[in-house]
Image (cartoon, helix red, strand yellow):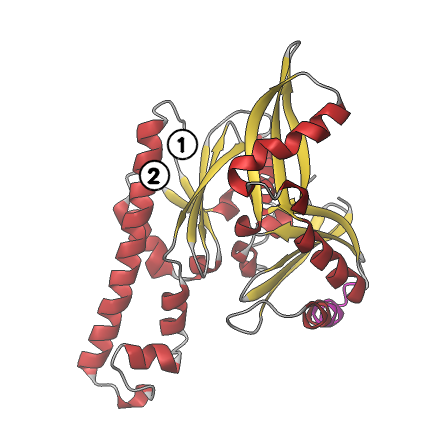
Amino acid sequence: MKNCLGIEIGNYRIKIAYMEKGVLREYISERIEEGAKPAARLCAETIRDLLAQKMIRCKKAVFVLRQEDSYVKKFKLPLMTTEQLKLNLPYEFQDYIGERLDAFQYDYAMIDRTDDGMELLAAACRKELCQQFEKIAKLAKLKIVGIVPSAIGLERILERALHGEKKDFAVLDLRTRAVMVHFFNDGIYEITRTMETGCMEIEKIWNRDPEMIRELGLDPDESAWDENDKKNLKSTLDERYRSIGIQIMRVLNFYSFNNTDNTIDTLYYCGGGARFKELTDAIRANLDLPVKSLGELAPEVDLEKMPEWLDSPQTYGVLLA
């Protein structure tokens, strides 16, 4: 898209990518009230303020659906008309959604088509959430031109990097509430494995959150710490890093065991947890394959100018349609 905004509203941050004439011009990652997504009006006001601060006047926006807010599935169907597909599509998600099919909105993209069948990548999200985005956009005086799942944003980054080639990928998303590994077969999204332990505790320790520091048996006043306190804190962080690294190793090993012909040769990482070099170093120490920043697949993005891009490259990826 020539001129457009990519917006993701998380539990802890609002991320905005601004593309102008096909080039990423600005990236914003702003922390919001901890613990809960803001109300639509507050969220809209925050977006308007951030755009005003950066003097961005673009009104078109693509909203990013977080991984937990959508279902994305690849499957095959017999050849059918568009109308038949619209009728059948909801039932492909019945295992996830149950009987609440009419409470969701659906969309799809064609991967492949033969004389007797077709392969699709489809998505479902709650109509209520789509309406929430519409409300936020209206209050922020923006025009929605798309609502796209997070995984598709990553897929588009991989697609651009592949230049028509086919290859398998694993992308590690170091989020605050959860750590996820997204798997892509021939560059097409396949599945996500989620680990419940996210980077929240690490972030709180690094930010010297008083409540977290007390839980560790330390005085919130850092000036009162002795060398033993500092050593114990470092030991706690090292254990958190190691635990996440081991979980990721197990997820990758399990995937490789069940997909012995995969061509994954590197683990690419992104997410807020990528800010912690000690964490990415611990992940490297537990894996037999290279661990690299997702930015290496997007050399057109200036990470020195926009290091926050790694918080959610998906907001950029959804603009690569």
Q: Is residue 49 magenta?
A: yes
Residue 304 against residue 173 in the figure, above or below: below
Give the side of residue 38 with respect to residue 180, left or right: right
Quadrant of the drawing holding the N terminus: top right
Camera-nearest label, 2 or 1 = 2
Let me know if residue 161 appears in the view: no
Residue 295 at x, y = what percent?
52, 48
- Tag shown at residue 45: none
Query: Which residue in the protein does label 2 denote?
Result: 252
Crowding at label 2, few (<14), some or many (≥20) Cα neighbours within 10 Å?
some
**The disc labelled 2 sits on which kind of residue?**
Leu
First along the sequence among labels 2 and 1: 2
**Residue pictured at 38% horizontal, 78% vertical:** 208
Depth check, front residue: 150 or 308: 150
Instruction: State the extent of the magenta-drawn residues as a range.
Output: 48-57
**Residue pictured at 66% horizontal, 9% vertical:** 115
Residue 103 against residue 176 in the figure, above or below: above
Residue 250 against residue 261 in the figure, above or below: below
